[in-house]
């Protein structure tokens, strides 16, 4: 029983030319995406450059999103930070402003399971009324073993799992029934290129970068999967992946902001450590995107 | 246009109590698997413990398989070795005995693309009449970029790709049309837990360890996918994955040989660096396998 | 021509039982260490748990140290942070309060040389009147190549290099003459166990965790090396290393705070992700330290 | 009480233009190096390209070295191989031909301590009359913990430790007294750039690639260290390291063979995965070597 469902943008954060959060463009992007039938917003995550912003900036973004969305869809705020006092302040703030859930990465240097559990427990205590989602990158970590440890924290209500390993992903899906029974359990897939497969293996939905500009194709992938239309779901996933491949070949975060400009939103440049996108490559990016059917996907 | 198709066991190598290749059991396992509708045999790979055997042992296994199969299905011989003279001797021998193709891992310490290309070129020269497949583990390597380099070698006819990243897998599938046109191009998926997804993304077939004992379920997964029966394909994949999960929890290679004993084949113990399977854990392994429906899958 | 010299504590940050910075104990530790003939203080680095504190906490620690030291020795403030706005605020603050230099790690996720250079350039602009030191962990990074790129930033005046590779360390030492001529160039060794070897290869001095409790032994190692007393320098290094080995076997940061308690300073527990030190292990830690001559080293 | 001492070449293996072992040149290099006061020969290791040769080739090299040396200095044969039957055959052969000791890397894929112990136990059983040395690369492995496990094997008599971490190195040195009492215990340093520091921390001697062409400088470093001449030892180490730095900048194994040509020995090209040295770069290599005093070091 997932609490949150559908295709969610890992919402980017627009910056002005002076590297400040661009509130008007942020509001405009939110309204645009709401028109695309998205399931909710995931704010200040990796794509949102949350860990590259100050606490004050992150709080301002979260407030703006909650206000602009105004209850039309749920909002999850990523509050992860290296410094626990910062993460705690962000979690507490998220609850205060009316966000629907909080999520956190496992911060760098948290290499010990006991430390990770203590970290999430502190977030839970700071936002006791909100569901708490772990944001796990599949890979060297044994994500399933870690999640089992986190289940002792009562507000832990799921995970955003980013990685291609669907066997591991499925085991996290199955933890819900094992530990939470009929209570809500949400597992989002975070690797856009594997959205369909995660959906087949029980994902509640997916959260990703490319849902800032082609959210509709993922909404359709989920729908086709529900209707058993394997052929069309596969075809849509392959089309979306071609767009994603182009983005990666141009350097992800910078290119993502350049794509938003193509859609009419001046989101500025990314923050360090991401690299700015060179203006002289815009035309080439646009051309390559068109060659793989970007316009049709963006219109969905 | 794949040259090789279907569900292929990464054939294990049975050893006697004195740690010698057990030829009679090898023949018996081959006949058993042929009765399950497999597409071919992949010999002396990781599961076959090829790199842990001497050159003479590897040649004897290859000869036995080719002789026992006797043309009923194709046979691919893995010839990878750290020492190029060994790999070359094995490739040349595979061609001489009538194998259908050769394959090789990227050996440890081959960290340079130019060296890997030279290595595969030497194998190609040693078995000029046989298709040559790369065996690539997805992960840190950029598998697609590497394969593009290998396409300059005329006998390179595909890849066995082991890893969960289906986006990368798909790009290797697409190299066939780009570089080989209508000539044969075979891409096997090597991660059993993702067989269905690879099949949806254009896999010729799959090669894996668990096909030594539950090959039929993968044959069915491919068939369901072809027929568009998404629900049953997913259900079968999830069932197979439960068996695989039990195997991993018991330590893979040792447990694999223990499972073969359950099926009636005394395959001995694995070679170092794999660990022997403790006799006292057999009953627990069997019980856990039965709890996830092993018997029914093995009977397919 | 090093600007900073000698044996420097990577000053720890004492916390109260309520996990707040313990200013009185911080002042007491500073005075204690000044009595040991240290060369300066390195503040809010890894040992100082800087990245696990809020910006406000870090600023308060830096202010306290500068005020308490009151010019008796130089103070270097570590200002590294994932979020560039935080790092910039800290660097600007360090200059404003009269620190002698700023330093920064390469933050996590800064995997691109261009991004690292831009990051250090921003710190330089934020504290244009202070020398800027990179804090480099030897290892996968090619530290020498990276430092060459950083030399374009005019305030870059050296490095704190933590790692055992003295061949690489030496190359960083040599960059000073190559790029800065007769201008100041400081290279600190950050791996306490290799202090002597770094000193032999041209280190300006060393900065490390164990200098919070046995700073005198390193002061003596530098002195013996200058006098050419190889035998005694080696003997002292081996003695210090035995203490360090005990610390590591008890879990570094927690044990470090427990050692300070042995010396009479109640520094509390470390912050997450470091683990608290269990009270019941104190006696064992103390006993093992005494067995390797801790008291004599601490008295130096 | 080390059994083996001094400066040892990790002897390279010369190949002919047809990629066969060049026996006459091998004999000539041996005699040349014996004239330089080396302590012994380490044969078919990484520098000797042992794992890139067939078992028959490795045996032929070992036989040639033992015969040519004819008891003038001890000979250690590296017998490590991925396939245990190969390693066992090589160890047994080394004992039969009169080698003085055998050594082995931890082969790739041996990630489990129990497997590593079983592997070395099998080598010990195959050459029960010879001391057995582990060849450990410092780094991710906890080399000390591993060595403690290996001490249960009675013929284990030391280690060749390649890595910069002298704190870890020292702990392996100390294992001798702890486990073997007054029996022989040999620990070689394998990182040429850190020879002096290892010598200060109790190394029996050093084994390395650059001792094929500048062995005398290491012999002198050991001597200066014994005499307490810190200044000259440091100066010699820095000079040697400049030569090593040039070699690395030209690609190690290929450049090593090119250097031997400068000394008058036509050693051919390295085996894959090492890259051949381009003839057109020889003059530049030679020039850069001369610029850092190669001739004087080679003459020592």
Image (spheres, coloured by chain):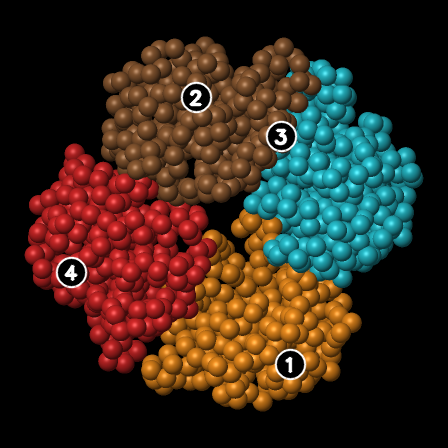
Chain colours: A brown, B cyan, C red, D orange
Any part of residue D186 in sight: no
Asked whether residue D266 is in view, the answer is yes
Q: Which residue is mark 3?
A: A292
Q: Secondary structure at mark 2?
A: strand
Q: Which residue is mark 1?
A: D261
Q: Chain of mark 2?
A: A
Q: CA distance from mark 1 to mark 4?
A: 54 Å
- In the structure shown, which secondary structural element does the residue marked by tag 4 occupy? loop
Element type where label 3 sits in the image: loop
- Above or below — where is A202 with respect to C146? above
The residues tagged by marks 2 and 4 sit, at their Cα atoms, a distance apart of 49 Å
Question: Residue B153 at what x, y percent from top left?
Answer: 77, 51
Residue drawn at the location 14% of the way across and 49% of the way down: C96
Q: Which chain is disc 4 placed on?
A: C
State the CA–CA distance, disc 4 to disc 3.
59 Å
- Dot 4 surroundings within 10 Å: few (below 14), some, or many (20 or more)? many
Q: Which residue was labeled with disc 4?
A: C74
Q: CA distance from mark 2 to mark 1?
A: 64 Å
Residue D79 to residue C76: above or below = below
Can you tell which mark lies on residue A158? 2
Quadrant where the image shows the N terminus of chain C: bottom left
The reply, left or right, for residue A143 in relation to residue B56 is left
Asked if both marks, 2 and 4, belong to the same chain, the answer given is no
Q: Chain of mark 1?
A: D
């Amino acid at each position: 029983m997932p609490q949150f469902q559908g295709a969610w943008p890992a919402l980017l954060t627009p910056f002005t030319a002076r590297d400040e959060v661009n509130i008007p463009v942020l509001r405009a992007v939110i309204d645009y995406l709401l028109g695309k039938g998205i399931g909710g917003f995931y704010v200040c995550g990796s794509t949102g450059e949350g860990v590259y912003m100050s606490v004050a900036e992150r709080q301002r973004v979260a407030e703006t999103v909650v206000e602009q969305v105004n209850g039309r869809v749920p909002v999850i705020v990523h509050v992860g930070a290296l410094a626990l006092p910062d993460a705690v302040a962000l979690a507490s703030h998220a609850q205060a402003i009316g966000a629907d859930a909080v999520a956190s990465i496992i911060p760098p240097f948290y290499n010990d399971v006991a430390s990770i559990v203590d970290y999430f427990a502190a977030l839970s205590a700071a936002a006791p009324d909100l569901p708490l989602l772990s944001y796990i990158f599949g890979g060297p970590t044994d994500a399933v073993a870690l999640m089992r440890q986190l289940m002792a924290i009562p507000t832990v209500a799921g995970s955003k799992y980013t990685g291609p390993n669907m066997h591991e992903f499925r085991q996290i899906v199955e933890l819900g029934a094992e530990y939470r029974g009929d209570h809500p359990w949400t597992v989002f897939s975070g690797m856009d290129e594997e959205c369909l497969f995660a959906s087949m293996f029980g994902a509640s939905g997916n959260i990703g970068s490319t849902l800032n500009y082609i959210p509709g194709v993922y909404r359709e992938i989920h729908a086709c999967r529900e209707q058993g239309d394997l052929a069309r779901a596969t075809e849509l996933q392959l089309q979306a992946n071609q767009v994603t491949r182009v983005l990666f070949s141009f350097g992800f975060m910078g290119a993502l902001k350049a794509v938003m400009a193509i859609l009419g939103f001046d989101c500025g440049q990314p923050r360090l450590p991401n690299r700015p996108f060179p203006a002289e490559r815009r035309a080439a990016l646009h051309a390559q995107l068109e060659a793989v059917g970007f316009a049709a996907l963006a219109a969905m």
